[in-house]
Amino acid sequence: MVRVFNVSDIILDLGANVGGFSLEVAKRNPNIIIHAIEPYPKLANTLIQKAKDECIDNHIVHQVAISDEEGEHTFNVSSESDGGTSSLLDFSKEHLQQDEYWATRIDLKYSEKIKVKTMPLERFLDGLVFDRILFIKIDIQGLDLTALKSAGKYLDRIDAGMLEVPATKDCSLYAKTDDELYSALKFLNENGFKIHKIKPNDPASNEFNVFFCRNELSYELLERNLSLREMHYYDGKHYWHFPSFRQEYPEEHIMHLTNALAEAHEESNKLKMKNNEYLDVNIILIKKSIFYKVFKLFKKSN
């Protein structure tokens, strides 16, 4: 199944950066409003200028950071490359030093700190008039799952999307993050989404891109109708480092995937234990109930 697009349907890009996704999607879907969210003023101004230069009038830029808190917070800016590792979170020095792949990256350092406006996604969406969110792309460095959760009452109006999460918390670039692959898959499953694909985002499988959509929808049809394929910032995420003749950092691939599986297995065991405890309690209650009924019958007969 695929929904017929409504004029009030929108697409969201959280962490729009230089506009590789939001501007291209806007050009391919001129009848759909694209909301590009980018907290860093320099990049936000670049997005506005690019849209103006290319005469794209369905692309709206919002200079705000999506978080689970509303207010003003410190935003860490990385000026290396395209500033794609800038975040509300601090880097985890421990993880960067311990991980062989992260240690090779020159862009994992901050050059300045600025104050930015923050708000939950639900609060942001309160200010928009729309029907459905056809697609949401989230890439906000350590807070992707947090941002999706913050959609609150609007979560049911999201059709499909993609987000980036570390394999486990120990693989994260950032300190004090709750995002990880298992938690993302669990949250999506519990909220009516199915997983379309899971793709590694780096040669060591430290991070993964998760593509998802509503259970009743066809991801392939939605992807086709929005013309998402053959777009660098979409296909790049989709096929990042794959296929390749040689798997880089094979030991770390195995270690990170093994850790993710171990966490899932541990959670499964906890759920089994809770289920067994629940069954034991109910069996005891049933036995007590039967015993009580038999006792009452015995008393009446005497």
Image (cartoon, rainbow, N blue to C red):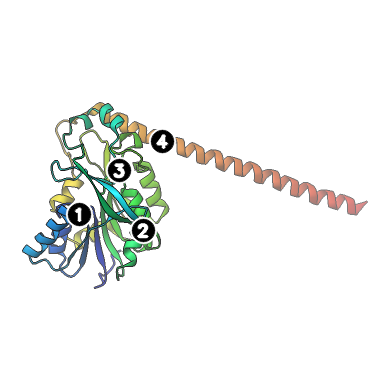
Corner quadrant of residue 44: bottom left
Instruction: Estimate the spatial distance between the alpha carbons at disc 4 and disc 1, rounded to whole Å.
Output: 32 Å
The amino acid beneath tag 1 is Ala
Which of labels 2 and 3 is toward the front? 3
Q: Which residue is mark 2?
A: 151
* Above or below for 196 versus 224: above
Query: Is 120 on the left-hand or right-hand side of 248?
Result: right
Dot in front, 3 or 1: 3
Q: Are marks 4 and 1 in contact (CB under 8 Å)?
A: no
Badge 3 is on which residue? 89
Q: Which mark sits nearer the N-terminus, 4 or 2?
A: 2
Please name whichever residue, 290 or 265, is drawn nearer the observer in this view of the structure: 265
Report x, y in % for residue 249: 21, 28
The first of marks 3 and 4 along the sequence is 3
* Of marks 4 and 2, the one in the foreground: 2
85 or 158: which is nearer to us? 85
Left-right relation of 179 to 281: left
In primary-sequence order, the first of circles 1 and 2 is: 1
Residue 242 sits in which quadrant?
top left
Q: Position of residue 149 (x, y in %)?
A: 37, 53
Residue 187: percent from left, percent from top: 40, 50
Q: Secondary structure at mark 2?
A: loop
Q: Amino acid at mark 4?
A: Glu
Give the mark nearest the N terminus, 3 or 1: 1
Of residues 224 and 117, which is closer to you in this image? Answer: 117
Identified by mark 3, the residue type is Leu
Which residue is denoted by mark 4 in the rendering?
Answer: 263
Q: Residues within 10 Å of mark 1 (few under 14, many from 20)?
A: many
Identify the residue shown where x is 70% and y is 47%.
285
Give the alpha-carbon distance from disc 4 to disc 2, as whole Å.
Answer: 26 Å
